[in-house]
Image (cartoon, grey):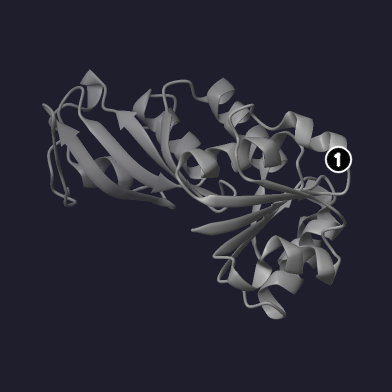
């Protein structure tokens, strides 16, 4: 597949190398030639010096044949406009914009674009690890607003039903339960066993309440 990465900062350089390693054709665009020094020595894609907003630069990058474009500069407004141009004027099938400043996230969302907020997501993950070290995030959607957590069932909840655990809580939905190396879809009457691994789809606030309930910090 053919991809264009606009912005060769740390994120852009890492993304470009990973795409190249996966066997894709990659063109990296940056306004500063020295930015390309961040690329991995084994990177063999194309580099193009120029302003990502310029139609001529995007044309030279092959935007009309591109399967996807990522705008990952440190300017949220630039990422939003470049992504909008790629999607609306060049009909690039998949466009992703990086959100650097959380206060400017609405700028990108106003264009209806797929966005990855590295600052917001990173801060939330650190908070989760500090506040609830017993939880393990196995899948994250959007910018971490909803995630799938892996929860180990403690001995105190052995032989109690799933509905006993999740029934009083809002915002926690069972996804799967793993027991003795095998996984299955649980129902409300499934009896929990010590050391079961329960995957739950939840928000950060809801998973905190579930963790408290499991550890008897809340009424069980």
Q: Where is residue 216, by image quadrant?
A: top left
Tell me: residue 158, above or below residue 177. Answer: above
Residue 128 in view? yes
Split into 4 quadrants, where in the image is the C terminus? top left
Residue 13 vs residue 220, the one in the foreground: 13
Q: Please report the residue visible at 77 percent of the width from the left and 47 percent of the height from the top.
A: 7
Q: Position of residue 41 (x, y in %)?
A: 64, 26
Residue 18 vs residue 162, the one in the foreground: 18
Q: Is residue 123 left or right of residue 148?
A: right
Q: Please report the residue visible at 44 percent of the width from the left and 47 percent of the height from the top.
A: 202
Q: Is residue 103 left or right of residue 192?
A: right
Q: Is residue 164 left or right of residue 90?
A: left
Tell me: residue 199, above or below residue 111. Answer: above
Say which element carries label 1: helix
Q: Position of residue 139 (x, y in %)?
A: 42, 42
Q: Position of residue 155 (x, y in %)?
A: 21, 19
Reading the image, the residue beneath label 1 is: 33
């Amino acid at each position: 597949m053919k991809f264009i990465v606009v912005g060769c900062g740390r994120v852009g350089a890492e993304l470009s190398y990973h795409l190249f390693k996966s066997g894709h054709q990659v063109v990296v665009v940056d306004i500063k030639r020295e930015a390309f020094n961040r690329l991995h020595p084994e990177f063999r894609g194309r580099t193009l010096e120029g302003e990502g907003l310029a139609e001529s630069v995007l044309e030279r990058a092959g935007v009309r044949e591109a399967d996807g474009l990522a705008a990952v500069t440190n300017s949220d407004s630039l990422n939003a406009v470049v992504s909008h141009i790629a999607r609306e004027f060049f009909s690039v099938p998949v466009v992703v914009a990086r959100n650097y400043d959380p206060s400017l996230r609405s700028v990108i969302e106003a264009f209806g674009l797929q966005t990855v907020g590295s600052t917001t997501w990173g801060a939330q993950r650190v908070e989760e690890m500090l506040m609830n070290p017993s939880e393990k995030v196995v899948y994250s959607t959007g910018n971490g607003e909803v995630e799938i957590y892996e929860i180990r069932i403690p001995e105190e909840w052995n032989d109690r039903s799933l509905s006993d655990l999740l029934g009083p809580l809002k915002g926690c939905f069972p996804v799967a339960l793993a027991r003795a190396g095998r996984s299955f879809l649980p129902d409300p009457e499934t009896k929990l066993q010590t050391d079961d691994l329960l995957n739950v789809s939840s928000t950060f606030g809801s998973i905190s309440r579930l963790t408290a309930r499991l550890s008897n910090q809340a009424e069980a």
